[in-house]
Structure formats: C-alpha cells, structure tokens
Image: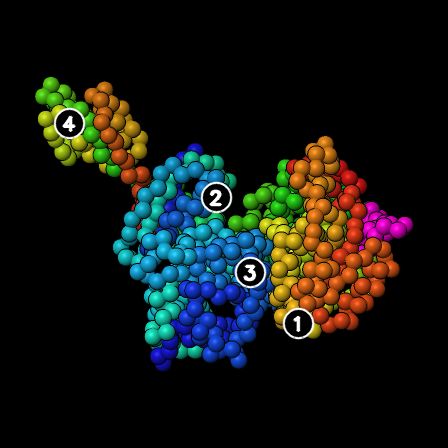
Amino acid sequence: MKQTISVLVENQAGVLNRITGLFSRRAFNIESLAVGVTDDPAVSRITIIVDSGNSVVEQVEKQLNKLIEVIKVRTLEESTMIGRELILLKVNANHKTRQDIMTICEIMGAKVSDISPNSMTLELSDTPDRIETFESLVRPFSILEVVRTGVIALQKGGGKI
Amino acid sequence: MKVRATQAILECLLEQDVDTVFGYPGGTILNLYDELYRYQDKIKHILTAHEQGAAHAADGYARSTGKVGVCFATSGPGATNLTTGIATAYMDSSPVVFITCNVSEELLGKDSFQEVDITGIAMPITKATYLVRDPQTIPDIMRQAFAVAATGRPGPVLIDFLKNVTALNQTIDYEFIHWSENRNTSSIRRLAVSHGLKAPEPDLGDVEKLVEMIGQAQRPLLICGGGVVRGRAHEEFRALAERLDAPVAITVMGGGGFPGGHPLTTGMIGMHGSQASNVACNECDLLIAVGCRFSDRVALQPDTFASQAKIVQIDIDRSEIDKNVLTDHHIIGSAKRVLALLNERVPQYSHPEWKERILSLKEERQEGTGDRLTPSQILTAIHKAAPSGAIVSTDVGQHQMWSIQHFHFDYPGQLLTSGGFGTMGFGLGAAIGAQVGNPDKVVIHATGDGCFRMNCHELATVQYYHLPIITVVFNNGTLGMVRQWQHLIYKEHYSQTTLDRGPDFVKLAQAYGLKGRRVTNRAEMEQALQEALSCGCGYVIDCQVDIDEMVRPMVPGGAHITDFLLK
C-alpha cells in the first residue's frame, strides 16, 4: 500500500543524506521523494512515498522522529490530502501527429512547453494516477524521454503538520 | 567576551563539568591540542596507543561514571579509527562526544592529505553529527551536542571542526554558561521543542493500565534491560521486583541493574540464558520488559517469544516499541520515572508457587575438579578475591558469557561489556576509561586470547598512567565462541579459529613494564590474584584453559527460547 509521509526538516547540508540513509539502512524502499524549501527559508519539506505495510511506515515515522534535523513527521491520509506530481515528457512529433498529441494535451490539461520539427515536450501537473493515464495515452507516439518530480502533498483544509 | 575559538571549545567542555578527555593528536587537530596545553591544569588528557582504544576508553568512562565521555582524534585515519568505538557506544546507548578536526575549508572536498568525510561515515552510528564551518556557531553546537548525547536515550555524537575554524587567530564572542543553565539557550530550546530533550513524562493512563494488568497476573516476569542501567533506575527496579514478588531475568546490557545475588533473579536470558530465565519467559503470563529492546540474542524467535504472556515494554525510545516483538502494552518514559510511578501504585503481591516453579530451575554452577583450570574456577577465584564492588570489563565471546553468567553485578556501571555491537578489543580500552573515572575501585578486565591480541597495545597506556587494571586472559588458544559454533553446527570444521601462536602474554606484560603470570590450576590462580591485587600496577594473568570448554546453556539463533542445544 502506498503511503505519503510529509517531513519538515532543517534546511542544511547533509539532511537529505541522513534521511535517505535511514531508509536504506533499514531496507525501507522509497517510491519517490521530493524536497523543497518552505515559506521559512530555514525549513525544507520532504515528501516521501513508500510502498509498505502499516507497521513499516510506523517504524519509519518513529525513526525519522529521532533525527535531530527532523522537525516534524506526519503520514498523510489519502482521502484528506492533495497530492500532485509534475511530469515533463518528450515525444516524437511531426506535422502528421502533432494535432493528435495536442488533442490529448487539451483533454488532460497538459501544456506544450517546447516544440521542434520532430518533437514536442509536454508538461502536466496532476495526481500520480492521471499522470500515468497521460503517459499511456502519449506512449503510442513514441516517447523519447520522461522526467517526474515525485509527489508533493499537503493536507486538505486549513490544517498543517 | 572575545575568546579564541579553540578556547571556546575547551570552555564548553568545562561548562559540562568535563575534566578528563581521551584522545590522540594529529595534523588537523594541532590547534586544539595547543589550547589543551594551556588548559592542562583543568582538563586531563589520556593519550592512548590507538584511537580505537581512546574511543573505548571514553565509552568505558561514560558507562562506569554515568557522565558524558569525551574523545579527541585527528582527521582521516584518526577519525576512521574511532568508528568501531563510536558504533560500540551507539549500539549500547552510551553517551560520548567525539571531537575530530578536518582539513581547512579551502582544502575540503579535494581529497587532501588525511581528509575524510567523517560526518558522513559516522551518520548511521551516532545520534547526531555536526560539521562546524563557522567558528561563531561553536558554543551552540557544543552545547547541543552534549544535550543530545546525554538526554533521552543516550548515545554518541560527533563534532567535526574544520582546521581553519580552530585557527589560533580566530576569535568569537563567548560567555561561560554552566550546563545546568545553558538548556535555555535558543538552539537547545528549539531542539527541546522538536525532540523533547527532557525524558518524556509517562502517560498516567498507561501506568494505571499496567497496574491493572499486574493485578490480574498469576505468573509475572520482569526483564531488566540496559535502560535500567543507563537510567540508573536500579533502586526503583528492585523495589518493583520485590513488590511483584516476581522472578527477574537480566539481559547482557541489564547487568548491574538488579543485584545478581538477589533471591528473585534467574540470571541471564536469551541465547546463553539460564534455564530458569528462558523457561520463565516461556511460561509467564505477564512479561514486563524495562529498557530492553528484545534483540535477536534475547528474543531469538520473536513470533513465539513469551507466547503465553501479555508483553509490556517500558522504554524511553518510542521507536523501540513493537520494533522486534509485538507488545500488548507499552509505557514511554525513563525507567526511573516509570518505575517510581508504578511503585507508588502497585501493592505487595505474593506468587509463591510460580516463584518456586521458576527458582527451582536455578542450578549451581559446576566448579570442575581435577588438575585443569576451568573457567568456573577462574571466575570463582576472582569473585572471592576481588572486593565486591569491583568493576568488570569484558571483551566478546566465551569469556564474556562466562563472566556475565558467573559474577554478581550489583550496581549500574559495574559491568562494562559490548552487548549490542559485540566488539572484540573493547575490554581493555573500557577498563582504562573505568579506572581513570573510578580511581578507587578495582577494575578487572576479562578477556580471551583472541580479543586481547586485538588491542593489547593499550597496555602501554595502562603502564604510563599507573592504572592497576587486572587483565585475566581466558587463554584457550582459539576463538572459543566461533569454535563452539563450528563444533555444534559446522561439523567440527575449525576453519581459521585455532590461535596456536604467540605472543607469550606474560612476557608481553613485562615488555610493557607490567607484571604477569601464567596459571594452570586453581591454587596458582588464587596466588596470582593476590599478587595482582597488592602490586598496585597493571597485571596480566594468563589462564590456560582447555580448548574445548563451551558456554552452557545455549539456544541457537532463531530457535525457540527453550530449545536448548546445550544444557
């Protein structure tokens, strides 16, 4: 079962290393991980997706809590969070296929970020499920390269961790 | 007030009431040692033969005194030589602050001479590591490091100063704040909010629930773990055990947490646990583990561990709950506090039948007669000759198990042993730290010939500082514990475990300016001990033990706790 762990950490060198080290040391597998600074420049937020049972996630959470650089840890509930991921996808495109790709983009709400005579780079920010759908729709046109950011997430409503 | 950066580092040690450090100098830490020269009347430095010895000594000092140990080393190999010592301290939750210096900022990351990323290396074996690049942060980081090492579940911390940070022309603003007051400085206050630097206050509801469970139990068992020792909760633990009238099993790390000679104790539990302890664990209906993490040497088979019992875990570290064994109830808090709360609420119970069932399984140890010196005879002789409060440090293997099974440890810090990491070579370093921290006590270092060979160069330290440590070598000419496994499980393939080689340990002791004697029977052992106890200097007793002696009982790893391979 995929679970989303949101971690507030001190924004300093080595913190990410410490956190990923903790995961590998205890053989917890990370599905995706996204890091960025928060409104407070001294604090970063790390969003980690793990595909594990509840007991593993509970142990991860407890171990993270022990790290000095970690300020707060929370496992976010699927139903009460907003999770988004950004994908950049470069696909083969020529004058024959360009319009079909544009139609998919329009339906999915994706943008065309770059274009050349034989390629297009598409950009979509959405839930991981819809990103998968988008990718599968574009796949028949022959994908050249893909990059995904990993999910970032916040709780719904006014609450914060 | 403006002071030199190095001065601030040493003043911060004085803030923590540190008067002794262990270490070894080198190129990048020259500035700090120069400052130490000026502080030599306030801070005593013990120079060991090897950084690993210094690390174990600082650890042994911390374990035996209850204070935070401090250890210095230089960059590169100096720092990496500490790592086994750091990991040993980490696994056994011993509070030590390790201070290393690294190359200067302009050389950092260029694979400079003796450069290594020690904060990276030490990350998984410390509670925290700090790389200090700005001298102004020294007081904050030093105070934080000590607070982190000593509070909650204790453990080692490493601070790595860049050499330019310690430059003697580097000055910073500094004001002396004694540790009892510096918890209010901003960085520690912040840390206290996010990490609860004070031990968590136990939940009274959780305590009440346990009181109720105790009331329902017919066959309660207590396990005394390392948390009782680290938390110096031995008096509270004993009071609870007597109130419950329950048998007490002791883990390796719990040695000293409950009096070894107390009528309620069943001795060690686990792989080499006594029959009484292991059967009690299997038959009890309530198991209360205090400061015990159910390691694989205790809960050999987690699924069947104490299968008839409700399992209750009392621990200061939340992440230990349900990590290895699933529990029915837990209380988070320091052993001392939780036990005190329980003692206020638990009435006097009596479990005569249950006690009789378990305590009747306790066996008198066979001394062994005949000419050959047996481990049991050695330990009995030590037990008789040494004063009752003598500190015992051990290395790892058969002699370690024999010593822990045989001796009665009565107070926390009396037994110094590498329980979690199982570090061969720990014993002599730890004994040095213990003797420095407890100059009035007798310190016995029990070791095997394999272990002793790993760090015996520290005899130079023993000699130089006139430490009257008595080293007792259980010399069976083999890596006994490994041989025991080879004998029982690997069809007697004694692969690379026979140590039929030098040195002559008596001559070795003499070469270091110490005394020594080889003993082959009980009478010689008794004489040697008398000589050792009266000579006032380091003494090595080379005890000739049979190569096929084994540690009994034994339950193999992963097996059910009462499936004894050896009784």
- The colour style of the image is rainbow
- Residue holding disc 4: A119
Marks 1 and 4 belong to one chain: no
| Rendered location of residue B427, percent (x, y) | 65, 58
Closer to the chain start, of discs 4 and 2, is 2
- Residue extent of the magenta highlight: B359-379
Q: Residues within 10 Å of mark 4 (few under 14, many from 20)?
A: some
Q: What distance separates the C-alpha of mark 1 from that of mark 3?
A: 18 Å
Decide whether residue B428 is among the magenta residues.
no
| Rendered location of residue B443, percent (x, y) | 70, 65
Q: What distance separates the C-alpha of mark 4 from that of mark 3?
A: 63 Å
Dot 4: element? strand
- Residue holding disc 3: B50
Decide whether residue B361 is among the magenta residues.
yes
Name which quarter of the figure residue A40 lies in.
bottom left
Callout 4: chain: A
> Relative to residue B64, is residue B93 depicted above or below?
above
Callout 2 touching callout 1 (CB < 8 Å): no
Closer to the chain start, of discs 1 and 3, is 3
Q: Amino acid at mark 4?
A: Ser
